């Protein structure tokens, strides 16, 4: 999935794969990560162990603009992902550049500009996945009820199907 594509992502995994890749390429960051719903969904250029340590120490602010923490060597810039009607759905976390410098004003602006699209993508995918889970549960319930009815009918007809068997 490309960030600029008109095609909707089909899963959170697709969003989580595309966003850190786009951030790495777009602003020349050493590493990048995507948090959604309070958990790590995707990361590039950083080990799982480093991410785990960082996540254990980080506290997500409930609201507010992009965050800065120049003392943070991994993710000095934090871009909130706010979706209309859904609130904060996550964070884009770009790392510093290979030379250790922070992203410039233009890069931060570009991240802010895609934040709305990323947030809507996450929100849309979550809604779709929740709806599909509910539908799968309903279908499983219908299948159980159908099986119970078939079993009951077989018992009442002595195993005959009622089609001239």
Image (tube, helix red, strand yellow):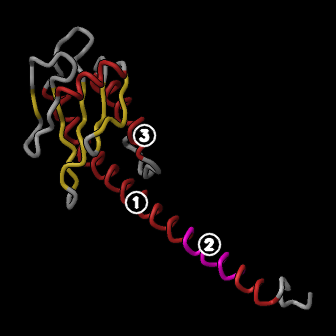
The tag on residue 130 is 1
Mark 3 or 1 closer to N-term?
Answer: 3
x, y (%) of residue 105?
13, 27
Which residue is rendered at x = 41% and y = 59% of the image?
A: 128
Q: Earlier in the sequence, mark 2 or mark 3?
A: 3
Q: Of all residues shown, which one is farthest toward the top?
A: 99
How far is mark 2 from mark 1, CA to CA?
Answer: 20 Å
- Considering only vertical position in the picture, is 13 above or below 53? below
Q: Which residue is mark 2?
A: 143
Identify which residue is drawn at 45% across, 51% down: 7
Nearest to the observer: residue 34 or residue 138: 138
Give the mark nearer the N terminus: 2 vs 1.
1
Q: Residues within 10 Å of mark 3 (few under 14, many from 20)?
A: some
Q: Which secondary structure lies at badge 2?
A: helix
Residue 146 shown in magenta: yes
Q: Nearer the viewer, mark 2 or mark 1?
A: 2
Left or right, 30 with respect to 125, comes to: left
Front-most of residues 71 and 113:
71
Local SS, label 1: helix
Q: Kindly report which numbered mark, 3 or 1, lies closer to the viewer in this rendering.
A: 1
Quadrant for the N terminus, please: top left
Q: Secondary structure at mark 3?
A: loop
Name the chief secondary structure element in magenta: helix
Q: Position of residue 70 (x, y in %)?
A: 9, 19
Q: Quarter-wise, where is residue 53 in the image?
A: top left
Residue on which the image places disc 3: 2
Q: Is residue 120 left or right of residue 136?
A: left
How many numbered marks appear?
Answer: 3
Q: Which residues are magenta?
A: 140-150
Q: Is residue 54 above or below residue 64?
A: above
């Amino acid at each position: 999935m490309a960030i600029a594509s008109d095609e909707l992502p089909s899963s959170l995994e697709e969003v989580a794969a595309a966003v850190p890749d786009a951030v790495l390429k777009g602003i020349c960051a050493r590493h990048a990560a995507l948090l959604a719903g309070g958990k790590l969904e995707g990361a590039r250029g950083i080990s799982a162990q480093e991410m785990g340590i960082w996540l254990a120490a980080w506290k997500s602010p409930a609201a507010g603009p992009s965050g800065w923490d120049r003392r943070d060597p991994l993710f000095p810039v934090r871009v909130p992902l706010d979706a209309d009607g859904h609130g904060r759905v996550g964070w884009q976390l770009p790392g510093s550049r290979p030379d250790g410098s922070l992203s410039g004003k233009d890069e931060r602006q570009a991240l802010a500009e895609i934040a709305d699209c990323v947030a809507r993508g996450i929100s849309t995918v979550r809604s779709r996945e929740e709806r599909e889970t509910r539908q799968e549960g309903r279908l499983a319930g219908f299948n159980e009820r159908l099986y119970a009815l078939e079993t009951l009918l077989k018992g009442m007809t002595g195993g005959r199907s009622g089609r001239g068997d």
